[in-house]
Every structure is written in C-alpha cells, then in structure tokens.
Image: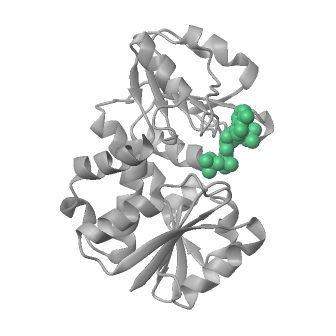
Amino acid sequence: MKFFAVIGDPIEHSLSPLLHNWVFNQLEIDAHYSKIKVPESELNTYIEKIRKGELAGINVTIPHKTKIMKFVDDVNSRAEIIGAINLVMLTNGKIIGNNTDWYGFVMALKNHKIDVTQKEVILIGAGGVSKGIIFALKQQGAAKIHLFNRTFEKISQFCDEIIHPHKMSELEKFILTDSIIINCTSVGMNTSDSLIDAGLLCKRQTVIDTIYTPLKTELILDAESIGARTMTGLDMFIHQALASQELWLGEAISNRVNFDDLKQYIESNLC
Ligand code: ATR
C-alpha cells in the first residue's frame, strides 16, 4: 500500500483525506491518504520520509507552501516561477516540489465559464495560494491584477507590468460594479468574517473565494444574495487534488473519476 498525506498547521479543516481516499476507493488503488499537523520545525522530517519511501508523496498547505521549498532537491519550473509548492514527490531519486494549485484554479474557471482574458482582477492575499492564482491569471491572459494584502510589505516587491500592489485601505476605491474579485486570504475559513463590505458588492461582479470550508463563505453568501456570479474554492480544491494524484501515480486519474459524483460527495461532507 502507498501512503500519502497533507501536511499543514492548522490541518483540522482539510478535506484532502476525504477526497483522495474516495478516489483511491473508486479506482481500487491500493493507497491511503491522511492529514498531519506539522510545525515548520519538522518540515524536513517529512521530506526525509518521502526519501525513505515511508510516504509516496505529500500535499503541503497553510502556512508551509513557500517555507518547504528550501528542503526539496529541485522545484518544477512552473512552481519555481510561482514561488510556492503544494506537492512533493520522489522522482528519479530526487525530492521534487511542484504546484497544482494554479492548474486547479484554471480548471475551476473553465468549469464556471469565467473568462479573465484582457480583464482587470482584484486579488486579496499574498500567501502560498495567491501565488499560484497570480500565475494562473497571467497564464489566462489577465490584463491587470490589483493586488491587496494586510501586510503591504509582502506585496510591495510583486510589482510588474501585470501586478499592481495596493494598500488594503485602498481596496474600496478599486471595487467597481463589474469587478472580478478573488479572496486568497484565509479570512472566512470557518468563520463568518469577510474582508469585503457587502455594500460594495453588485450584480455584475464575479466573486471568487479560494476557501471551501465552509463551502459558502460570508463573502460568497453576500455576493450570491446580491445576484453576483460566484465561485467557491471547491472546484479548485478538487482539480488540484486530481492533478496531484496524476503526478504521484503517473496515471490519467481525472478521466476515470466522475467529477460531479466526487463534488457531490465532498459537498455532502461540508453541509
Ligand atoms: P495560504 O497558503 O492559504 O496562502 P498563507 O501563506 O498563510 O496561507 O497566507 C494567508 C493570507 O491570508 C495572507 O495574505 C495573510 O495576510 P498577511 O500577509 O498580512 O499575513 C492573509 N490573512 C490572514 N488573516 C488575515 C486577516 N485577519 N486579515 C487580512 N488578511 C489576512
């Protein structure tokens, strides 16, 4: 049997074991996936577990997606550009870090028929998740990314021809009646907090949350109630997980999984 895990701190919120074990079960793959709370000081221990074959692969979540990069032997070229990894595996004797978050986000946009080509996007957050999403938005041809973060110092160096960093206090000024707004912070995870005042939301906007616990965050509920187009973090979560399995197992898993059945299964565990 192959053993996989997601490591993070906190980790209680993670539905990754539920998802991966459902897929293993459906496809009769002899593998098991667990969640492990790992502090930063123990990251290297888990890299060594992969090297020794005790773990066949890991996903990495909050808050380690960037910090773990220094412990791997090599990083996939896209993940290198992104500057964050959410997956680690052993390939030809080397510990490789990779990123499937960006791909999960692109697939989720496709599912929801959200086109960001030549559009301006408002993105809040500058952690591991937002790095993958910035890569995906650029790859999908977004014209401008207005980037906001509580700690401005973290994003002041992000500036390029696409990314425009702003102070959080300026967010309100940038929200237009037809904005595409993406929450990449952890605000709203298992709380009813939202960084965006409901009064700023309108019908013609597209509001995206990367959080899936709860399935509908306060931000998504506010946007839904005003009639805006919304996308929760669930599709991205499922697609990044299936892409992780494809890399670990070297098989085209996605084609063999019924996406709607899997989504329904996860949703039923969220309600
Ligand atoms: P992830 O891997 O999910 O991106 P992370 O790297 O820990 O997790 O990043 C969390 C993001 O949520 C950061 O942008 C963080 O802002 P700071 O850079 O200022 O820490 C943001 N965040 C977390 N709690 C927040 C809060 N209460 N208000 C605003 N932003 C918050």
Q: Position of residue 224 (x, y in %)?
A: 42, 19
Q: Would you identify the image quadrant in which residue 43 lies?
A: bottom right
Q: Residue at x 62, y 79 (%)?
A: 47
Relative side of 18 to 125, left or right? left
Quadrant the N terminus occupies: bottom left
Total numbered circles: 0
Q: Would you identify the image quadrant in which residue 18 lies?
A: bottom left
Q: Would you identify the image quadrant in which residue 149 lies?
A: top right
Q: Residue at x 74, y 25 (%)?
A: 167
Picture layout, residue 175 above or below residue 39 = above
Q: Position of residue 38 (x, y in %)?
A: 68, 68
Q: Residue at x 46, y 59 (%)?
A: 16
Relative side of 153 to 224, left or right? right
Front one among 40 and 173: 40
Picture layout, residue 16 above or below residue 222 = below
Picture layout, residue 238 above or below residue 202 = below
Front one among 265 and 31: 265
Front one among 217 and 161: 217
Picture layout, residue 182 above or below residue 204 = below
Quadrant the C terminus occupies: top left
Q: Note whether residue 121 is visible.
A: no
Q: Note whether residue 237 is visible.
A: yes
- Describe the colour scheme in one phrase: one colour
Q: Residue at x 22, y 59 (%)?
A: 257
- Ligand 1 lies in which image quarter? top right
Q: Position of residue 32 (x, y in %)?
A: 42, 75
Front one among 197 and 215: 215
Q: Position of residue 181 (x, y in %)?
A: 51, 25
